[in-house]
Amino acid sequence: MPDLTILYYTANRLPEATARLIYADLVVTTFPAPIVSVSQQPLADFGLNLSVGDIGANKYNAYKQILVGVQNVRT
């Protein structure tokens, strides 16, 4: 899948245990596609992680995070 990149964005509002399950499943099901993750808090070992800081959870900021991610996708 050389022409596919997974873009994951989060406001980090899920419980830690739930988020880890989601991350683990996404990594396994999308391998070998690269993952670009955009989060409001740093994520360890989850592809290229871009942390935008705690900007709040709303539609505007979701689109802002998507834009940051798309600007860093290389496929």
Image: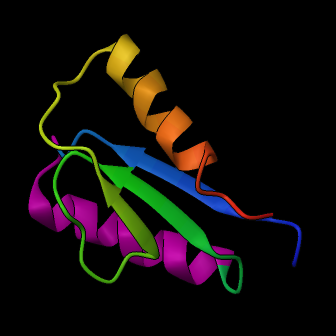
Give the quarter of the figure containing the C terminus.
Answer: bottom right
Q: Would residue 34 appear left or right of 19 to someone viewing this image?
A: right
- Magenta span includes 16: yes
User: What secondary structure do most residues of the magenta stretch adopt?
Assistant: helix
In this rendering, is residue 34 above or below 14? Answer: below
Q: Nearer the viewer, residue 17 or 54?
A: 54
Q: Would residue 34 appear left or right of 20 to someone viewing this image?
A: right
Give the quarter of the figure containing the N terminus.
Answer: bottom right
- Magenta span includes 25: yes
Q: Nearer the viewer, residue 72 or 5?
A: 72
Which residue sits at x=56%, y=69%? 35
Q: Find residue 17 and report its horizontal and vertical position in percent.
A: 14, 67
Q: For residue 44, what is the image quadrant?
A: bottom left
Bounds of the magenta segment = 13-30
Q: For residue 52, what is the image quadrant?
A: top left
Q: Find residue 48 and report its horizontal and vertical position in percent.
A: 45, 72
